[in-house]
């Protein structure tokens, strides 16, 4: 049996004091969504724990300057956390806790508004547990394991047998019941989901070596992050990167986090691997996020197709927006979100988010436009941006860029990275360049005639 490390089992989050926390009841009776599975089909013996936050050193910065990674928009209408929560619902797992802390205001609000009123089953819920202080614990969560330990009094409210641990910012489709069934058949204490497509590459959650029975022989974590390591005397086996997804028996998790914590290295436990063969994107960089959005456009070739899957749909917040208004625009190979206003423009290979406004003679190619949470036609809501409304101005040309929400792009602006710069920090000017992709920061103002 391998020696178990507390930090190799659970993905990490940063320890920081949240500036604003929003908690809403998961028992709101005013909203009923009949699309969710009937109660008779739901697995009442499993509860999911979804982590919405990563450390302040987010790999998706500056998209995470004012939001957590799980709250970053994807494919026009959605947030990344919607993929994970939809996987739970489609897998008939309806007891879902979302533990949040860093930059969590947007995420807490989205989860509460989108899922808190849904009647998932008789005892089903999606409940946000925001970081808190108490007489016994007057600091903030010090990591994932600490967050679970301090929330055990809530997590153990229902008599479940296993907990499913999930990062909230990955894009993939998985039937968690298959993972849970494999865990039960193996009689393992802990089962970790491993990405079978990639071998010998640490994607941020460590590398596991398996024997022919998928029992874990060895674990290696990124040495730059941690020195935790366990192994047995066996050396033959295949190595696979962890996806940060775990099934843990209830009693084992309690023992790890109360009796053994923090000296878990002395505890021996049976750990099995579960090989996942589908599409999985962990959003480990701006380039990965951009690529994931571009792949949603290519429906015929996309490995992730839950946006159009009748049997495993992707749920999100119903916004009740008007249909998109298209005025003599030419649109090819693109996704257009709800409530957009598209004038006489040309859009190709682009994801256009909700409430996006694109002016006359503008050209947008191979880009991600996140849109806006409000309509703004005259630009008078921001004294610094008078005359430049939210959206893309007349005659502007945007290519291979990510435009964050509420950005104000003036008229005749060129965002094309004409000098092919690969990396650049121009945050003071409202944008950065990562992997050759220009990222215009949330609420940035790009004046008329600017060339980037």
Image (cartoon, rainbow, N blue to C red):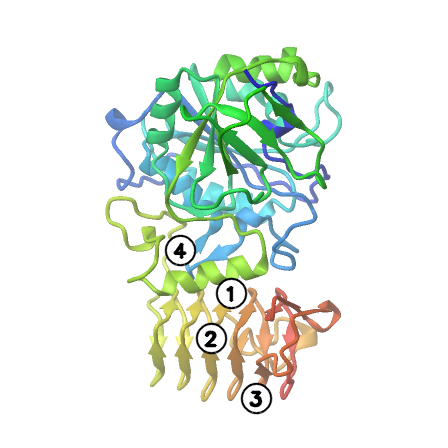
| Alpha carbon distance from label 4 to label 2 | 17 Å
Q: Is residue 170 visible?
A: yes
Of the numbered discs 1 and 4, the one sitting upstream in the chain is 4
- Relative height, residue 331 to residue 62 (above, below): below
How many numbered discs?
4
> Which residue carries the number 3 mark?
412
Of the numbered discs 1 and 2, the one sitting upstream in the chain is 2
Q: Hey, which residue is sitting farthest front in the picture?
A: 236
Q: Using the image, tell me which numbered label, if any, was put on residue 319.
A: 4
- Relative height, residue 115 to residue 452 (above, below): above
Q: Are marks 1 and 2 in contact (CB under 8 Å)?
A: yes
| Viewer-proximal residue among 82 and 237 | 237
Quadrant containing the C terminus in the rendered view: bottom right
> Which residue carries the number 1 mark?
372
Quadrant of the rendered structure where residue 432 is?
bottom right
| Alpha carbon distance from label 3 to label 4 | 32 Å
Q: Does residue 341 appear left or right of residue 108 in this picture? A: left
Which residue corresponds to the image point at 55% horizontal and 41% vertical from the top-left?
A: 52
Q: Are marks 3 and 4 in contact (CB under 8 Å)?
A: no
Where's residue 237, x and y in %? Answer: 49, 30
């Amino acid at each position: 049996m391998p020696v178990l490390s507390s930090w190799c089992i659970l993905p990490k989050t940063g320890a920081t004091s949240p500036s604003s926390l929003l908690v809403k009841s998961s028992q709101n009776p005013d909203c009923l969504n009949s699309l969710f599975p009937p109660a008779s089909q739901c697995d009442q013996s499993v509860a999911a724990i979804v982590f919405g936050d990563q450390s302040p050193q987010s790999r998706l910065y500056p998209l995470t300057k004012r939001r957590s990674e799980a709250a970053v928009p994807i494919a026009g209408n959605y947030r990344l956390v919607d993929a994970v929560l939809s996987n739970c619902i489609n897998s008939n797992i309806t007891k879902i806790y979302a533990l949040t802390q860093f930059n969590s205001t947007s995420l807490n609000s989205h989860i509460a508004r989108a899922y808190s009123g849904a009647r998932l089953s008789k005892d089903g819920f999606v409940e946000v547990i925001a970081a808190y202080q108490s007489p016994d614990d007057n600091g903030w969560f010090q990591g994932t394991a600490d967050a679970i330990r301090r929330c055990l009094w809530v997590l153990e409210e229902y008599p479940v047998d296993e907990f499913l641990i999930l990062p909230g910012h990955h894009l993939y489709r998985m039937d968690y019941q298959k993972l849970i069934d494999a865990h039960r058949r193996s009689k393992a204490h802990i089962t970790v989901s491993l990405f079978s497509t990639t071998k010998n590459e640490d994607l941020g959650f460590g590398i596991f070596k398996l024997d022919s029975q998928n029992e874990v022989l060895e674990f290696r974590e990124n040495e730059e992050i941690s020195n935790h390591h366990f192994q047995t005397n066996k050396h033959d086996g295949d190595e696979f990167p962890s996806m940060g997804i775990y099934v843990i028996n209830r009693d084992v998790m309690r023992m790890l986090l109360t009796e053994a914590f923090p000296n878990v290295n002395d505890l021996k436990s049976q750990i099995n691997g579960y090989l996942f063969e589908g599409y999985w994107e962990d959003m480990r960089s701006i380039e990965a996020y951009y690529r994931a959005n571009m792949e949603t456009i290519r429906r015929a070739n996309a490995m992730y197709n839950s946006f159009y899957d009748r049997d495993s749909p992707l749920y999100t917040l119903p916004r009740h927006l008007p249909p998109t208004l298209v005025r003599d625009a030419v649109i090819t190979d693109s996704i257009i979100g709800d409530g957009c206003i598209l004038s006489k423009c040309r859009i190709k290979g682009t994801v256009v988010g909700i409430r996006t406004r694109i002016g006359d003679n503008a050209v947008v190619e191979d880009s991600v436009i996140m849109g806006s949470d409000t309509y703004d036609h005259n630009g008078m809501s921001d004294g610094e941006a008078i005359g430049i409304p939210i959206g893309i101005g007349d005659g502007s040309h945007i290519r291979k860029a990510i435009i964050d929400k509420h950005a104000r792009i003036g008229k005749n602006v060129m965002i094309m990275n004409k000098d092919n710069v690969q990396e650049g920090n121009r945050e003071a000017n409202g944008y950065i360049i990562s992997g050759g992709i220009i990222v215009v920061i949330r609420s940035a103002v790009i004046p008329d005639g600017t060339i980037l």
